[in-house]
Amino acid sequence: MKFISFILLSAISTSSTSSSFAEEWFTQQDLEQAVQLRNQASGSPTGYNIVESLTTEVGPRLAGSDADKVAVEWAKKQFSTLGFDKVWSEEVKFPSWQRIHETGQILSPFPQPVRLTALGNSVSTPAEGLTGEVVHFNDLDELQNADADQVKGKIAFISKRMGVYKDGKDYGATVGARVNGASIAASKGAIAVMIRSVGTDNNRTPHTGVLHYDAQSAKIPAVALSNPDADLVIRQLNRGLPVSMKLNVETKVNPEAVSYNVIGEISGSTKPNEIILLGAHLDSWDLGTGAIDDGAGVGIVMAAAHYIGQLEKAPKRTIRVVLFANEESGLFGGKAYKKAHLKQLDQHIIGAESDFGAGRIYQLDANVKADAWPAIEKISGVLSPLDISLGENHGDGGPDLSPFQHIGMATFDLKQDGTHYFDWHHTSNDTLDKISPNDLAQNVAAYTVIAYLSAQMEGDFGKSAPEEEKQK
Ligand SMILES: [Zn+2]
């Protein structure tokens, strides 16, 4: 009894002399350790070395390809080398798509070749290619509202250009043409769909990315022109003469491909069943080497957990890093993870995913219960020397974590400067030289801090707000 009241008294006296409420969440020692980790990670090359290794030794790793299998083995080996004490993989099944070849040319009025790429999931043209007149739409809505007689038998061309924003917000407004353009065009009788690349550059490097065929419409071939080639086709159309083009695309689908979510853990010391989830995706498109999408994320989250694993004293909670399979053609890894770990939802204290390149982080958003916001504020204090400001409590947890976030997992959202991300995204230009080692290290430092403090924190982050509530 005496002992208890002593504890009680000292607890009260600590809180009455403490300078801030947030010390109820973290001990001074934890905060100091986080600062030390931040300083170490922001000056270290580990994250960059991981992306360098993945892009150099594996390269493009389209889900279901032979290189994807090499990537899975690479990831397991990296986890072990980096000192993760548990490493395993979980099967993910999906139909895998493969590009064989693609070419395009303007036949008239002014014949010349163009640079294009088949969109992921696109069917093939006939072996000799297909030829048709181009009908132009400024955006997907215009196509949607067009009369079928305008479109029938033609190549539907959607030319909306993506705008440049730091947070990449125009992607959502532009990507619909890529995802749904083929089925909407097919429903009006088009023989193919051709879009302006969903990208912000002026390089002659077309941007691929996945499309979805709906079950009601015919599957027609779908390609993306590079931005300069989209401009070229428009200039020919502006001459007022019919423009006809030839497209030749060959692709292949393996309906029963298999890959793996590869998982590494730094086991918690006192709350090993409580999980801090860090994610990135291991697969990439086939055109580049998958450096910014998402080799950077792989390097960031692996390195962050690695630094925590190197501490003399293990963190209280477990840090789990999941490298998701096949994000690119429809979040297959994220959905498989949700299915396999549904019963452990409540053990997932918070999650964060890095999948937006290697630009510097400028803001910390989160999606936690309102009561836990003071903890986010305290974490933000440790991040502020990295020039990361405190944002808002309606963050998005990243694509692969979204299935888990939508059922309530709390998330961090470390917002990166994506001004140039969509110059290279899904193109042959997605290569290592686009990554600044310093910027990447800043990302690693931030992930190290959020993961470590979440693992040490007293209390919890509660649930993320459901979508409907977030709108308010
Ligand atoms: Zn990605």
Image (cartoon, rainbow, N blue to C red):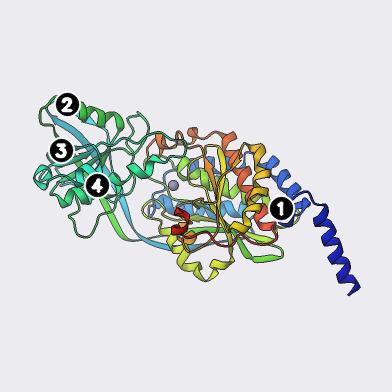
Q: Position of residue 146 (x, y in %)?
A: 15, 44
Q: What residue sits right under mark 2 in the picture?
A: 238
Q: Amino acid at mark 3?
A: Val
Q: What residue sits right under mark 3 in the picture?
A: 135
* Residue found at x 23% / y 46%: 250
Q: What residue sits right under mark 4 in the picture?
A: 181
Comparing 336 with 392, the one in front is 392
Question: What's the distance in space between the residues labelled 3 and 4, CA to CA?
Answer: 13 Å
Q: How many marks do you count on the picture?
A: 4
**Residue 295 to residue 262: above or below:** above
Q: What residue sits right under mark 1 in the picture?
A: 22
**Residue 293 to residue 261: above or below:** above
Question: What's the distance in space between the residues labelled 3 and 2, CA to CA?
Answer: 12 Å
Q: Amino acid at mark 4?
A: Gly
Which-is-in-front pick, marks 3 and 1? 1
Q: Earlier in the sequence, mark 3 or mark 1?
A: 1
Q: Secondary structure at mark 4?
A: helix
The answer, for residue 82, to whether it is visible in the render is no
Q: Earlier in the sequence, mark 1 or mark 2?
A: 1
Q: Position of residue 95 (x, y in %)?
A: 32, 59
The answer, for residue 39, to whether it is visible in the render is yes
Question: What's the distance in space between the residues labelled 1 and 2, CA to CA?
Answer: 63 Å
Q: Residue furthest right?
A: 2
Q: Amino acid at mark 2?
A: Asn
Q: Secondary structure at mark 2?
A: loop
Q: Position of residue 323 (x, y in %)?
A: 51, 54
- Ligand 1 contact, mark 3 (Cβ < 8 Å): no
